[in-house]
């Protein structure tokens, strides 16, 4: 287990590792936003709302819907509260990604950060109005639920963080150092 002193944000080596990882984390997050927003643009300009287009039979279809709520449409009457929670999530993830020096954590954190930014953007700038915007969903998973590209990154990033945590991988992973020779 890494020594706390070797993973402290006050350690110049840790700060140097963060400076190396952070730009790539932000590029990943920006890529998630770009991919999600461009796929939503495609869905809105190509698909007819509510009409399924088979991709893999009935298992996966394109089906354009607008979701005012959270996952599975929960809380559709409280979109403004979901927007506030999303804003806090973006701020919290922004702080997290500025403290990561582990590449694996950077991938997970960048995926979550990009997904949270993209969903917050929908909440703020889509119809029916500021803070009440609906999420564009278009990937129908066999009628179980309909999601979008960001949902894939959010779920993948969350699973990765759980697995990294369970495996004991620190977000500020210490550099591997040769063990000191044992006195014989």
Image (tube, grey):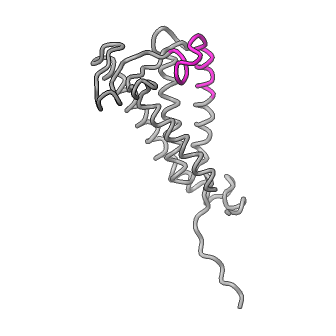
Question: x, y (%) of residue 92?
Answer: 63, 34
Question: x, y (%) of residue 64?
Answer: 36, 18
Residue 77 within the segment the image draws in magenta: yes
How many numbered circles are shown? 0
* 172 displayed left or right of 121: right
Question: x, y (%) of residue 127?
Answer: 45, 10
* Extreme-bottom residue of the structure: 184
* Extreme-top residue of the structure: 128
Residue 161 within the segment the image draws in magenta: no
What residue do we see at 57% from left, 43% from top? Answer: 97
What residue do we see at 55% from left, 22% from top? Answer: 70
Question: x, y (%) of residue 28?
Answer: 44, 41
- The magenta region covers 68-88
Q: Main secondary structure of the magenta part?
A: helix
* 173 displayed left or right of 49: right
What residue do we see at 51% from left, 53% from top? Answer: 103
Q: Is residue 141 above or below residue 104?
A: above
From the image, which quarter does the N terminus lie in? bottom right
From the image, which quarter does the C terminus lie in? bottom right
Q: Nearer the viewer, residue 14 or 111?
A: 111
The image quadrant that residue 77 belongs to is: top right
Q: Nearer the viewer, residue 44 or 178?
A: 44
Q: Is residue 156 above or below residue 49?
A: below
């Amino acid at each position: 287990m890494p020594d706390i002193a070797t993973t402290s944000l006050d350690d110049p080596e840790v700060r140097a590792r963060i400076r190396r990882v952070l730009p790539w984390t932000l590029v990943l997050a920006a890529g998630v936003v770009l991919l999600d927003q461009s796929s939503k643009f495609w869905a809105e300009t190509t698909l007819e709302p509510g009409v399924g287009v088979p991709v893999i039979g009935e298992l996966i279809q394109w089906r354009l819907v607008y979701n005012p709520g959270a996952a599975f449409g929960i809380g559709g009457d409280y979109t403004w509260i979901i927007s506030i929670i999303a804003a806090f999530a973006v701020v919290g993830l922004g702080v997290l990604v500025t403290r990561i020096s582990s590449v694996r954590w950077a991938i997970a954190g960048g995926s979550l950060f990009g997904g949270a930014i993209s969903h917050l953007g929908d909440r703020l700038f889509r119809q029916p109005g500021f803070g009440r915007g609906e999420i564009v969903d278009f990937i129908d998973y066999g009628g179980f639920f309909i999601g979008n590209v960001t949902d894939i990154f959010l779920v993948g990033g969350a699973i990765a963080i759980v697995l990294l945590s369970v495996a004991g991988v620190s977000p500020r992973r210490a550099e591997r150092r040769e063990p000191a020779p044992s006195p014989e």
